[in-house]
Amino acid sequence: MYSIYSLKESGSDIIKYIGMTRQKIKYRLSQHISKAKASIKKNRTQAWIVSCLNSDIKIEIDIIEENIDSIDLAISRESYFIKLYRGINGDLKNETEGGNCMNDGSYWRGRKQTKEHSDKISNSLKGRKPRPEEIKKSVDRMIDLVYEGNYPGAIKIDQYDLDMNFIKTWPSIRRIEAELGFGYRSIWYNVNNITKKSNGYIWKKSGM
């Protein structure tokens, strides 16, 4: 049986990583920590884990959904939760949308999902309710924290016009999205210098 799990910093409601495992949950956490310490070229998740360890911040692992009886369904559920939480917190450390159950990310390499396969997953999902109250509470807490920018490591955003005249400092990108209707990712790309502007403005991390 497979389980979908989350990683977060102790004392925080902000989920940082979503994963899938068929191992005992505590052992999976120890694997994450061991690999993060040993890796020379660290990915986003490993860099975050090492940063927590160096700051004496405990990492917590929680089961989101369990007793999933096939790897195909487990991968589908992992992808679902990655998309769900990435939509709330753009700083989710997952580098893909799921399906990397092999260490080299090779599960889907060369595979093509047939209609029969899709139908099988769809039928398996019918009636499935993965801890609905816990998930709803978790999502609501994350939305509140990210919206207000009220969590450790929250990044405030400065808004400028195209002539670089300062307009306003926002507590979070989510607040900009909620009040001005601008897409989260569009602003995030500009903040990270992937684009030159977004929605007629220039956005930068506050204090940069």
Image (cartoon, helix red, strand yellow):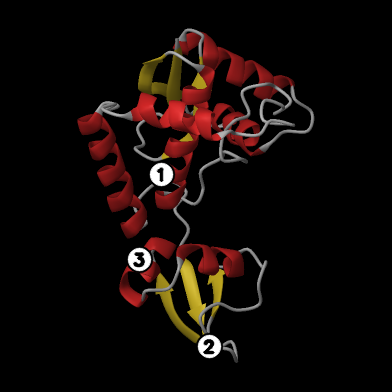
Position of residue 151 measured from the top left corner of the image (x, y, whole percent) = 37, 48
Residue at image point 72% right, 27% down = 106
Which residue position is annotated with label 1? 84
Closest to the observer, 50 or 69:
69
Residue at image point 58% right, 67% down = 191
Q: Which of marks 1 and 2 is nearer the N terminus?
A: 1
Q: Earlier in the sequence, mark 3 or mark 2?
A: 2
Image quadrant of residue 152?
top left
Residue 175 is labelled as: 3
Q: Is mark 2 on a helix, strand or loop?
A: loop
Residue at image point 37% right, 17% down = 66
Q: Nearer the viewer, mark 3 or mark 1?
A: 1
State the count of labels.
3
Which residue position is annotated with label 2? 161
Residue at image point 35% right, 32% down = 11
User: Which amino acid, by three-letter code, is at mark 3?
Assistant: Arg
Q: Do the residues labelled 1 and 2 touch (CB within 8 Å)?
A: no
Position of residue 119 measured from the top left corner of the image (x, y, whole percent) = 45, 31
Q: How crowded is mark 1: few (under 14 residues within 10 Å), some or many (20 or more)?
A: few
Q: In which quarter of the image is the C terminus?
A: bottom right
The answer for how far apart the CA atoms under marks 3 and 2 are is 18 Å
Q: Earlier in the sequence, mark 3 or mark 1?
A: 1
Closest to the observer, 105 or 46:
105
Q: How crowded is mark 2: few (under 14 residues within 10 Å), some or many (20 or more)?
A: some
Q: Image check: 56 left or right of 95?
A: left
User: Which amino acid, by three-letter code, is at mark 1?
Assistant: Leu
Rendered position, 26 above or below 115:
above
